[in-house]
Image: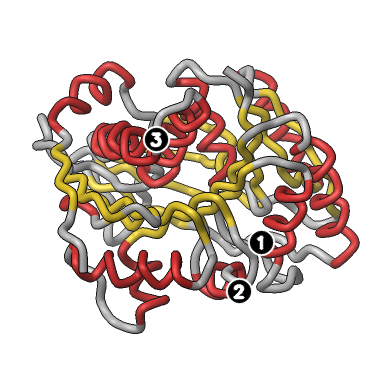
Amino acid sequence: MAPILTLTVNPTVDICYEVDRLAKIGKTRARVRYVAAGGGGINVARGLSRLGGRATAVHTAGREVGRRLNRLLDEEGVDHLAIGIAGETREAFVLFETGTRRSYHIVPPGPRLDDGEGGRLVEALGRAAGRHEYVVASGSLPSGLPDAFYAVVARRVKEAGARLVLDTSGRALRESLREGAFLRRCNNHEAAGLAGRPVRTFDDARAVNEYLLAAGATEVAITTLGELGALCSTRHGHTELRAPPLPGEVLSDAGAGDAMVAALTLRLAAGDDPVEACALGVAVAAAAVLTPDTEPFDREVAESLCPAVRLRRQAGS
């Protein structure tokens, strides 16, 4: 299977601390649970490796935290290409409270990038994309870059002859619609931003997916609905994928979207159709919410949940 290229414009070094319980007054003694490179595309690359695939992560890296990010990726064995920037790569913090089993995520906005840095990133991605069938761009944009940055990325990936899988939010999502991608994944909150109303049901998701397909923004539209599952849509129709019953309690939804994108892109690269690929994605996302904070999903749990993902093709309009 050909390797998959991922893009992370605004990566992080994730530092997770474990506490028994947060103290309202005074000090809370903490233990370092783990330190790892993070950010959308990097998380996708890690998920791909966990599922037996191969990935190269293209990302920015700036100053001391950027050097630490590179070192963490090297130590983890993640193939990556760092594009240097002047600003400091951000650090994100996770507090896991063992008493309540709750996770608290503190995520800063990240460094400001200028046009030259954004241009170098696109050029590096464009050169690398020609050697890959699939490119995954996932995550937020830092300040300084235009909201249409992902539209530029989509154009370059298409020119390189690769297929783009895009997962972003907010203004970056809306502005990216001017350029077509192969596949777009939106969660229900991102989809609500496009629809201008809550997206809670499969019918709500269908309206969003039909809008994306009709606008020529994508060939495959996937809207996820949390514990309900996901709707996968192409010009051939819409398929509901209901999430499997969970064998444990939900501990954190952080990283579930990236895990899903990793799984479905892996299966697309292996030749599966979008619905089959999405089924594994739903199972992997379900496994991901069973792990605390941003810990990787358990592959065996994900594979055991896959047969329980129920598919239902929606009737035509």
Question: Is 205 situated left or right of 73 in this image?
Answer: left
Residue lying farthest to the right in this orientation: 116
Residue 212 or residue 228, whichever sits in front: 212
| Image location of residue 263, percent across then percent down | 41, 32
Q: Amino acid at mark 3?
A: Asp
Please tell me how crowded label 3 is: few (under 14), some (14-19), or many (20+) other residues with Cα within 10 Å. Answer: few
Looking at the rendered structure, the secondary structure element under dot 1 is helix
Report which residue position mark 3 lands on.
273
Residue 30 shows in the view? no
| Image location of residue 276, percent across then percent down | 32, 33
Quadrant the C terminus occupies: bottom left
Question: What residue is shown at x 35% (from left), y 43% (from top)?
Answer: 256
Q: Mark 3 or mark 2, which is nearer the start of the sequence? A: 2
Looking at the rendered structure, the secondary structure element under dot 2 is helix
Q: Amino acid at mark 2?
A: Glu
Pointer 3 with pointer 1, Cβ within 8 A? no
Residue 58 vertical position relative to residue 54 in the rendered view, above or below: below
Distance between the alpha carbons at the discs numbered 3 and 1: 25 Å
Question: Is 281 situated left or right of 266 in this image?
Answer: left
Q: How many marks?
A: 3
Residue 211 shows in the view? yes
Residue 153 vertical position relative to residue 21 in the rendered view, above or below: below
Residue 264 vertical position relative to residue 303 in the rendered view, above or below: below
Report which residue position mark 1 lands on.
150
Question: What residue is shown at x 31% (from left), y 23% (from top)?
Answer: 298
